[in-house]
């Protein structure tokens, strides 16, 4: 039986329709091969020599002579820090200059070290890199938001498989975040509680949509999942800003993140996915009503017109079924 479910943050209806079939054939075609080599001579990250590139951040946590993680400016940035911030009107239209930044976080020197194959320390360092970039860029008061994301798998916008994530620093708040902020503020205004704290509490109590948890985090398939196997990872205690998280939280985040990706790999193989870090706006003080979290969307069905043009998300996999499959996945730790 299909049913509409309402997302309590976005106030958006999602149609959970198990009758709809997933195009499994296209999934198989998209899955990244297990036979990707450790080194690929055509890959710009494998052969990165640092010449002509400004290195924004470099970690060597194993061998001092080699890099382990790098943050570099994107080779063809569409936003530039040097650009003067201009806001103007063009008749009925508003225009803001493309001030900002595009950066790439090269997560590993090893070409085929996908997330589920990384060790805990590397994942923790990736999150520390996000933290360090936020702390650095926060000083530029023109910047309103840093969106960290990952596009894994061969899709039109991403032909590089080498482990990396990206960041765009913007002078506007991304629309989806703005909607989450408004929805969360609205919820707070009449319940006096953070909606994400309430989600965490209810999900842990019910358990049916929980994938796994540790003392600081829980990973779930959200009630109104827009995509099959959509995953959210949330801190259990209220915290608005990712960069305000404690040292132990980064360790436990790495722990649940690795656990979740090992489960995802066990169930769906090297499925292409998008990951985004949803954080509070850069220049805001601690917020009572918003709670940072990570969202992951495996790319399992094509973007349909009802979704792109009508805003109707049709998800053929019940979040409870997805969570059960992931929770029960028997992976090698
Ligand atoms: Zn590579
Ligand atoms: Zn909260
Ligand atoms: Zn979110």
Image: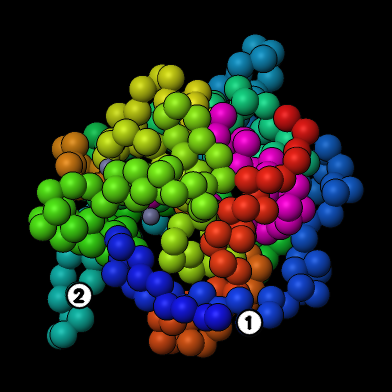
* Residue 66 x, y percent position in the rendering: 69, 19
Residue at x 83%, y 38% (from the top left corner): 39
Q: Quadrant of residue 224?
A: bottom left
Ligand 3 image-quadrant field: bottom left
Location of the C terminus by quadrant is: top right
Say which residue label 2 marks: 94
Residue at x 62%, y 25% (from the top left corner): 120
* Mark 2 crowdedness (10 Å alpha carbons): few <14, some 14-19, many ≥20: few
Say whether residue 281 is visible: no
Does the numbered disc 2 mark a residue whose Cβ is under 8 Å from ligand 3? no
Residue at x 51%, y 87% (from the top left corner): 305
Residue 150 painted magenta: no
Q: Secondary structure at mark 2?
A: strand
Q: Which residues are magenta?
A: 255-279
Which of 156 and 96 lies nearest the eye of the viewer?
Answer: 156
Q: Quadrant of residue 33?
A: bottom right
């Amino acid at each position: 039986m299909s049913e509409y479910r309402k997302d309590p943050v976005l106030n958006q209806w999602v149609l959970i329709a198990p009758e709809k079939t997933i195009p499994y054939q296209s999934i198989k075609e998209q899955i990244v091969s297990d036979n990707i080599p450790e080194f690929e001579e055509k890959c710009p990250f494998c052969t990165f020599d640092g010449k002509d590139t400004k290195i924004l951040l470099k970690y060597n946590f194993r061998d001092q002579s080699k890099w382990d993680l790098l943050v570099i400016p994107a080779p063809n940035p569409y936003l530039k820090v040097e650009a003067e911030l201009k806001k103007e009107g063009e008749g009925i239209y508003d225009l803001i200059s493309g001030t900002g930044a595009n950066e790439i976080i090269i997560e590993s020197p090893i070409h085929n070290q996908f997330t589920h194959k990384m060790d805990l320390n590397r994942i923790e360092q990736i999150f520390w890199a996000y933290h360090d970039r936020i702390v650095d860029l926060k000083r530029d008061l023109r910047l309103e938001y840093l969106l960290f994301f990952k596009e894994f798998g061969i899709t039109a916008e991403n032909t590089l498989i080498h482990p990396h994530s990206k960041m765009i620093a913007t002078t506007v708040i991304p629309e989806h975040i703005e909607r989450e902020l408004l929805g969360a503020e609205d919820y707070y205004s009449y319940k006096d509680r953070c909606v994400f704290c309430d989600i965490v509490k209810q999900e842990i109590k019910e358990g049916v949509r929980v994938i796994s948890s540790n003392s600081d985090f829980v990973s779930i398939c959200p009630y109104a999942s827009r995509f099959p196997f959509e995953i959210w990872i949330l801190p259990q205690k209220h915290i608005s800003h990712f960069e305000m998280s404690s040292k132990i939280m980064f360790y436990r985040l790495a722990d649940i993140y690795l656990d979740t990706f090992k489960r995802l790999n066990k169930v769906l193989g090297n499925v292409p996915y998008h990951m985004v870090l949803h954080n509070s706006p850069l220049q805001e003080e601690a917020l009572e009503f918003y709670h940072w979290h990570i969202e992951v969307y495996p790319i399992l069905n094509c973007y349909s017109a009802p979704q792109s043009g009508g805003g109707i998300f049709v998800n053929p996999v019940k979040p409870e079924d997805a969570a059960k499959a992931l929770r029960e996945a028997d992976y090698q730790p």
